[in-house]
């Protein structure tokens, strides 16, 4: 079979990125930006959990957990702090095994275990009634937190929600197009996901050892998964790269894919979904609502 091919990270772009990292990028400036946030660590379930905790000036604000994905980090939310903090107390944990939470060294850290750890974090902070939000892996964790603590999570919001076919659900033509797009992606699993799901330790050696391999691995995702009209600045991208590079978490973050597999978190709390034109998958609303009815019936 002959198929079209597109190289996602052109050599010239990668050369420019590496050159900027080596000669122009100022880590200390971006380190200071992160250190301007009130940040903390605690040990939960035998692992360190790092988290900025930005309290609202409004004492009655709702606590909200913001959960990043891969290859993201807490920097995903830096531009949201100002617009969100008037109404929310923000807790922004680094996933165990990722960047500033440091590497995990044992099996079992799937989205459900992460969700339980973040639920315990919110309990320790005294936030017994809170919301959750996330995209990519953060979406699964945000929903799993609602499933793990239904009496404490008032609502979940996600910006990534893959939906699977369900027999007997009526779909519009647009729904069918979205479902076909999801099926095509499931049939042609991206190479990075296959490696992380089957050989995370192998890719770990390559990324941890190569100062060009790590940014190439991350930059390809930032390029392919973002709206081309909302490009992420090169310094913001390299700050994300630095958080993985300095902490040696390429391998442990990849293991989340292997540990979690294709399990469904489920969410019986009220669920909001943001859908954007350039999302890599577009959720099919009738399928999402059918799954929610199933989980609501189990609560």
Image (cartoon, rainbow, N blue to C red):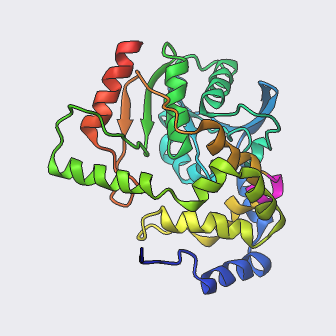
Task: Give left or right: position of 278 versus 264.
Answer: left
| Residue 146 sits inside the magenta stretch | no
**How far across and how far down the image is residue 293, in percent?**
31, 22
Foreground residue among 137 and 195: 195
Residue at position x 49%, y 41% from top? 84
**How far across and how far down the image is residue 60, in percent?**
50, 22
Q: Can residue 88 be spotted in the picture?
A: no
Task: Give left or right: position of 16 versus 103.
Answer: left
Q: Which residues are magenta?
A: 244-248
Foreground residue among 279 and 5: 5
Foreground residue among 156 and 173: 173
User: In the rendered view of the protein, which quadrant contains the C terminus?
Assistant: top left
Foreground residue among 151 and 141: 141
| Residue 246 sits inside the magenta stretch | yes
Image quarter for residue 297? top left
Tell which residue pokes out farthest to the bottom in this image: 12
């Amino acid at each position: 079979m002959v198929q079209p091919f597109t190289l996602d990270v052109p050599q010239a772009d990668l050369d420019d990125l590496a050159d900027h990292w080596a000669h122009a990028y100022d880590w200390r400036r971006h380190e200071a930006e992160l250190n301007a946030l009130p940040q903390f660590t605690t040990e939960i379930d035998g692992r360190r959990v790092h988290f900025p905790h930005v309290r609202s000036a409004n004492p009655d604000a709702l606590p909200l957990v913001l959960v990043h994905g891969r290859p993201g980090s807490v920097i995903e939310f830096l531009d949201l702090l100002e617009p969100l903090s008037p109404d929310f107390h923000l807790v922004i944990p680094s996933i165990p095994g990722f960047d500033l939470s440091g590497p995990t060294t044992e099996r079992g850290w799937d989205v459900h275990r992460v969700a339980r750890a973040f639920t315990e974090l919110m309990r320790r902070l005294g936030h017994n009634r809170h919301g959750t939000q996330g995209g990519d892996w953060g979406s699964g964790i945000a929903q799993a937190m609602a499933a793990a603590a239904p009496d404490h999570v008032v609502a979940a919001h996600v910006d990534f929600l893959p939906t699977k076919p369900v027999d007997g659900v009526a779909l519009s033509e647009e729904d069918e197009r979205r479902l076909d797009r999801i099926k095509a992606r499931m049939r042609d699993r991206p190479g990075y996901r296959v490696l992380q799901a089957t050989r995370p330790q192998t890719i770990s050696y390559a990324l941890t050892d190569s100062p060009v391999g790590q940014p190439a691995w991350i930059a390809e995702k930032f390029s392919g998964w973002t709206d081309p009209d909302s490009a992420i600045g090169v310094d913001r991208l390299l700050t994300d790269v630095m958080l993985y590079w300095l902490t040696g978490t390429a391998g442990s973050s990849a293991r989340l894919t292997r540990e979690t597999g294709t399990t469904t978190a489920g969410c019986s709390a009220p669920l909001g979904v943001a859908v954007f034109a350039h999302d890599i998958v577009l959720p099919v609303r009738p399928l999402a609502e059918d799954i929610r009815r199933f989980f609501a019936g189990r609560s």
